[in-house]
Amino acid sequence: MQITPRNEPISRTIEDPLLSWMQRYRRNLHRIPELGFDLPRTHAYVRSTLESLGYTVEVVARSGIVAVRQGIQAGAVAFRADMDALSIQESARVGMSRHNGAMHACGHDGHMAALLGLARVMASRERPQKSVVFIFQPAEETAGGAEAIIHAGVLKRYHIEAIYGMHLYPGLAEETIGVREGILMGQDGEFDVQLTGRSSHGAQPHLGVDALAAGAELLTRYRTLPETILPHAREGVLNVGTIHGGEARNVVGGSARLSGMLRSFDEENFDALVEGMHAIDRDVEARHGVHIDSTIRRLFPPVVNDSELYRTLIDTVDMSAIVHPEPLLLAEDFAYYQQRIPGLFFLLGTKNDEEGLHAPLHSPAFDFNERVLLRAVEVFLRLARAHGV
């Protein structure tokens, strides 16, 4: 297959049989959504597909898969797809999942299909100068499967010099490529807060310590924290997602629990949010008489695109297809790869209002037109060629 010059439309550069092939594989993967590292059917399907294409695969990180198109010279470029789904009940509009309570609502079925498409194209080409490594990673949505891939020694064992990743994104027009040099996505964290007061009869509140009232104040003050302490409110977010407590309508609540998430674009702002939460906790404890025990967990670091790889993408892809979105406070464990080696992550637009394809990620109605997978494969091929593959 030939790659056309960068100023020619990408949609004309790959023959329709590849699209039909990827459509079939995407839909088959969509029917079997699985969670975290527990991906037996997904793993078996991806592995058998790669083996049918002539690849020898390595199993890593419990359910992850690595396949290699061996090059002539030392060094390799890697492309990564995530494999896991979400604990979401799919809407009837999409209606392909065969697992109740699980759905590929974040496009990982498309990510896998696109990477399989790239593997199919590479398998039919002459031996490349450098190796191409295909990484199918579990547990992006939960436990940070990227770390497990790294700890398995994949980056060192295959002498990977650069890594690329892609995410389908309904916030951009269909087939648009969204990319930025530097920060693209935020640092991720989550928290659990336990408030302990003292129960009493609701008609005698002076005999109790109301944990529910204290929890309500925490909720309000947490949510306004970014705009009060950060230089710019859009540089961070703090969301309380759950609040539970109380025993009965006529009882002063003796305990309450809150949980939520926080995001920022850098560690300094993240630290400021954490310190701000602790300061609010101490103040609420003093004024309400409750005891507050909070646990804050740092999860994925920010996604920071390598400058040289960013220029590689800009130099190899038609500029009319590229947009530069503002950094997003979404999170991605692809960031762990970028902490070890140069990496670049880009967004591939799926929004198509005419076809009703605009539901956000993690929505039970998220869907996309599979023709965008051709764009993904084409971009991957151009990047591979830029690295001497």
Image (cartoon, rainbow, N blue to C red):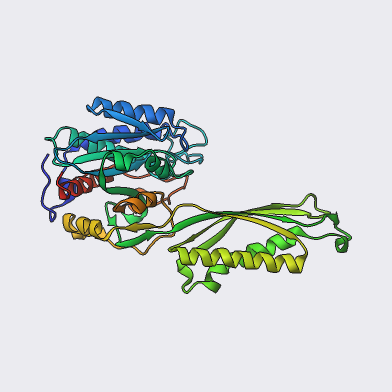
Vertical arrangement, residue 197 with respect to residue 96, above or below: below
Q: Is residue 287 shown left or right of residue 118?
A: right
Residue 121 percent coordinates (x, y): 19, 36
Residue positioned 31% across, 32% down in the render? 25
- Which quadrant holds the N terminus? top left
Can residue 65 be seen at all in this image of the molecule?
A: yes
Residue 124 percent coordinates (x, y): 15, 32
Q: How many numbered circles does the render carry?
A: 0
Which quadrant of the view contains residue 258?
bottom right
- Which quadrant holds the C terminus? top left
In front here: 4 or 327? 327
In front here: 56 or 30? 56
Q: Is residue 211 shown left or right of residue 84?
A: right
Residue 158 percent coordinates (x, y): 27, 39
Residue positioned 64% across, 62% down in the render? 219
Q: Is residue 327 shown left or right of residue 287?
A: left
Q: Is residue 21 shown left or right of residue 105?
A: left
In front here: 319 or 53? 53
Residue 76 percent coordinates (x, y): 22, 43
Which quadrant of the view contains residue 2?
top left
Can residue 20 be seen at all in this image of the molecule?
A: no
Residue positioned 54% across, 72% down in the render? 229
Which quadrant of the view contains residue 117?
top left
